[in-house]
Image (tube, rainbow, N blue to C red):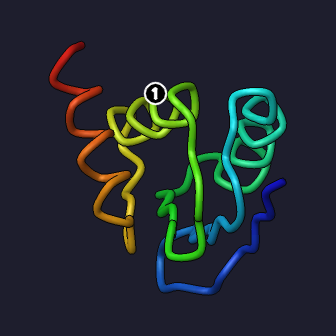
Amino acid sequence: MWKVQRLPDDGFVVLRLSGRLEGEQLSELQEAFQSVAANQDLVLDLKEVRLVDQEAVSFLAGCEADGAKIRNCPGYIREWISRERSRN
């Protein structure tokens, strides 16, 4: 189960994600991103994310490759994203 909260920030759309990010929910999450971040700079705040799976890491790596910023990323998730990006 995940939750997304939009936070005010100068010039950016900041989405704070919380909970568990798993592959089966990614289509919903992608729709949420597209609906709030169209033509704006996107920042994903992962401070409250507790668990991810491989599909979620691939998705986050793709978001970052497409220009989204990721902040407050737990160390193990950052390492996993880095490995995912280096493979591609």
Residue 69's spot in the image, x, y percent? 37, 57
Is residue 61 rendered to the left or right of residue 3? left
The residue positioned 71% from the left and 41% from the top of the image is 34
81 relative to 71, above or below = above
Q: Quadrant of residue 1?
A: bottom right
Of 85 and 74, the residue lying toward us: 74
**Amino acid identity at mark 1:** Ser
23 relative to 39, above or below = above
The residue positioned 76% from the left and 65% from the top of the image is 4
Is residue 62 rendered to the left or right of residue 2? left
Q: Residue furthest left?
A: 86
Of 31 and 12, the residue lying toward us: 31
Of 44 and 56, the residue lying toward us: 56
Residue 50's spot in the image, x, y percent? 59, 64
Q: Mark 1, residues whose alpha carbon is within 10 Å: few (<14), some, or many (≥20)?
A: some
Of 75 and 73, the residue lying toward us: 75
62 relative to 12, above or below = above
Q: Which residue lies furthest to the top in this view?
A: 88
The residue positioned 73% from the left and 33% from the top of the image is 26
Is residue 3 rendered to the left or right of residue 46? right
The residue positioned 24% from the left and 27% from the top of the image is 85
Residue 52's spot in the image, x, y percent? 57, 45
Report the quarter where the C terminus lies: top left
Q: Which residue has dot 1 on it?
A: 58
Residue 73's spot in the image, x, y percent? 38, 65
Q: How many labels does the image show?
A: 1
Q: What element carries label 1?
A: helix
